[in-house]
Image (tube, helix red, strand yellow):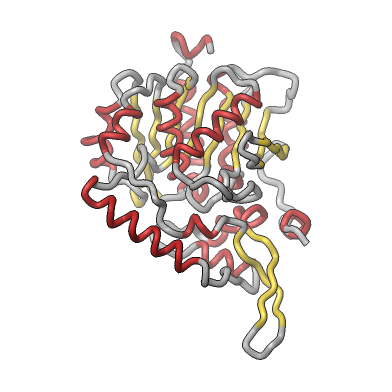
């Protein structure tokens, strides 16, 4: 029995005032990407280039990361047409797992390029949380003439590692990959226990908000217990290879090369209790983007503040987007 057959019946809460469409994209490498698609009620109306967004979630999250934020953006940026397509990145949610490729950030960039091609978008904006923000900055630097707006949620580019530390990092990746073959899949007897587990860790999500991720983040599993009985429970849909350290190591110079190519306006909404200290971003990376205007907004909250306080983050985004309605952006 698939997760798509079991979980929707357990989650019948309507999110916001807008219907969500399910989309699917077949990529040239055989990957099937699933997505959630929000669009204002006039479905025949075409959104301007600066009112349609590709949304990329964070590490181990899925497209439902935007369930609370997306409807608010549609409402606040209206009444003109607004469109948001939030992907389940490869290896996450309901999307395929990679079998012949790794999960390097540039693989996700290539996936996003094919999705945009299938959507028929010539130009568009992008919204990325955490890892999705890192992907967004590489995408924006690679396809700099395509992006109209770049919105980063508790991110300001990929994490980096000193070059001299990269050999040890790769060695540890290989060791973890070997050990993974003998590990059992995580088992949660209830959805509630899965929510509690997802809320743990440095950047965990509060359980009531973690629950939003579960329809796409869990699948049913059986586990034989010590007494021989078979228990029904849940495990993650996420590819378990994502739980070990990535083989890739990016240097500061590498990331700077991409971010220095970004031409569009950039908004970074950074949580006070989030991933990146505000002063580090302001002092070190803001100056890398010289071709586009950068706005940094600090907000109270934790790493997943776009879920835990969606109304505040939506207001920060919407007010900034509306401020861009001048000059060239207004014509897009």
96 sits to left or right of 159: right
Res 125 visible: yes
83 sits to left or right of 50: right
Q: Residue at x 64, y 74 (%)?
A: 189
Residue 264, placed above or below residue 201: above
Residue 264 picture quarter: top left
128 or 220: which is nearer to us? 220
Residue 45 picture quarter: top right
Q: Residue at x 51, y 53 (%)?
A: 60
Residue 320, placed above or below residue 133: above
The image quadrant where one finds the N terminus is: bottom right
Q: Position of residue 52 (x, y in %)?
A: 58, 25
Residue 73, placed above or below residue 274: above
256 or 58: which is nearer to us? 256
Res 80 visible: no
243 sits to left or right of 235: left
Q: Position of residue 159 (x, y in %)?
A: 34, 45
Q: Residue at x 66, y 76 (%)?
A: 223
Q: Position of residue 16 (x, y in %)?
A: 66, 41
């Amino acid at each position: 029995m698939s997760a798509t057959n079991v979980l929707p019946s357990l989650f019948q809460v309507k999110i916001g005032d807008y219907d969500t469409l399910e989309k699917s994209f077949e990529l040239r490498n055989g990957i099937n990407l699933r997505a959630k698609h929000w669009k204002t009620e006039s479905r025949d109306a075409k959104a301007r280039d600066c009112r349609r967004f590709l949304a990329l979630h964070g590490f181990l999250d899925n497209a439902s990361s935007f369930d609370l934020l997306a409807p608010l953006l549609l409402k606040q940026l209206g009444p003109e047409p607004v469109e948001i397509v939030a992907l389940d990145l490869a290896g996450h949610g309901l999307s395929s797992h990679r079998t012949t490729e790794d999960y390097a950030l540039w693989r996700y960039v290539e996936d996003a390029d094919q999705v945009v091609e299938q959507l028929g978008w010539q130009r568009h904006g992008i919204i990325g949380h955490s890892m999705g923000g890192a992907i967004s900055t590489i995408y924006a630097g690679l396809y700099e003439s395509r992006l109209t707006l770049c919105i980063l949620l508790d991110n300001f580019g990929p994490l980096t590692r000193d070059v001299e530390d990269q050999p040890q990092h790769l060695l540890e990746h290989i060791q973890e990959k070997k050990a993974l073959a003998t590990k059992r899949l995580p088992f949660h007897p209830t959805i509630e226990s899965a929510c509690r587990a997802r809320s743990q860790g440095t950047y965990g999500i509060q359980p009531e908000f973690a629950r939003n991720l579960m329809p796409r983040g869990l699948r049913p599993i059986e586990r034989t217990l010590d007494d021989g009985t078979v228990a029904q429970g849940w495990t993650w849909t996420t590819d378990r290879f994502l739980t070990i350290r990535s083989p890739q190591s990016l240097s500061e110079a590498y990331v700077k090369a991409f971010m220095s190519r970004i031409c569009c306006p950039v908004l970074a909404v950074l949580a006070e209790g989030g991933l990146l200290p505000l002063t580090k971003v302001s002092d070190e990376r803001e100056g890398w983007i010289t071709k586009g205007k950068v706005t940094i907004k600090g907000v109270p909250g934790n790493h997943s503040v776009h879920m835990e306080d969606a109304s505040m983050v939506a207001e920060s985004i919407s007010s900034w987007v509306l401020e861009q309605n001048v000059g060239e952006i207004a014509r897009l």
